[in-house]
Image (cartoon, rainbow, N blue to C red):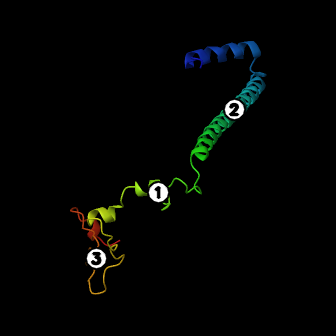
Amino acid sequence: MFDIGWSELVVIGVVALIAIGPKELPTVLRTVGQWMGKIRRMAAEFQGQFNDAMREIEAADIKKQVDEATTGLNAKFDPLDFSNSAWNPNSDTASSAPASPSTESTGGSAAQPPPATPPSGTPEPPAAPAPQETAVASGEGSRPA
């Protein structure tokens, strides 16, 4: 913020010592330090309130966008309405629905799904062995503690 170097601080200190005097200088510096602390606390409080207000604005904006999206979605989609669904066997759209992948691969005949578990006679593949630690070339791992 301010570009004050060490040479400027020394000049300010010498002028303060001459103008205020060595007897009153410690109390003046203490008072200046207290005022600086109050100013910093007020600035931090203001910045915190400003950040809170920005978060509330962003949260309200996100909530508005989500509400708009859900109202649009709710107007277009009703999960309980089966009148125009491929799941309804009585509707005209059910006959135009694409065939499932299991019926396409077998030429139109319904096939049994593969079993979820292998048959009991099929052996399971052996487990991979756990990696073993190797000794370091310098011999660090071979020394007792």
Q: CA distance from mark 3 to mark 1?
A: 45 Å
Image-quadrant location for residue 14:
top right
Q: Amino acid at mark 3?
A: Ala
User: Counting other residues with Cα less than 10 Å from the Cα at mark 1, is it few (<14), some (14-19), or many (20 or more)?
Assistant: some
Tell me which numbered mark, 3 or 1, is placed earlier along the sequence. 1
Q: Is residue 139 left or right of residue 71?
A: left
> Which residue matches tag 2?
44
Amino acid residing under circle 1: Ala
- In this view, the residue farthest toward the left is 137
Q: Do tag 3 and tag 1 residues touch (Cβ < 8 Å)? A: no
Secondary structure under tag 1 reads loop
Q: Is residue 38 left or right of residue 69?
A: right
Q: What residue is rendered at 74% in x and 20% in y?
A: 22
Residue 96 vertical placement versus 141 (above, below)? above
Q: Position of residue 128 (x, y in %)?
A: 26, 73
Query: Which disc number belongs to residue 127?
Result: 3
Indicate the secondary structure of the residue bearing disc 2.
helix
Task: Residue 76 in the image: state x and y as whole percent.
Answer: 57, 45
- The residue pinned by badge 1 equals 86
Residue positioned 28% across, 76% down in the render: 127
Q: Nearer the viewer, mark 3 or mark 1?
A: 1
Q: Is residue 115 above or below residue 34?
A: below
In space, the residues marked 1 and 2 are separated at their CA atoms by: 60 Å
Give how far across and how far down residue 47 sits, in percent.
Answer: 68, 31
Q: Does dot 3 land on a helix, a strand or a loop?
A: loop
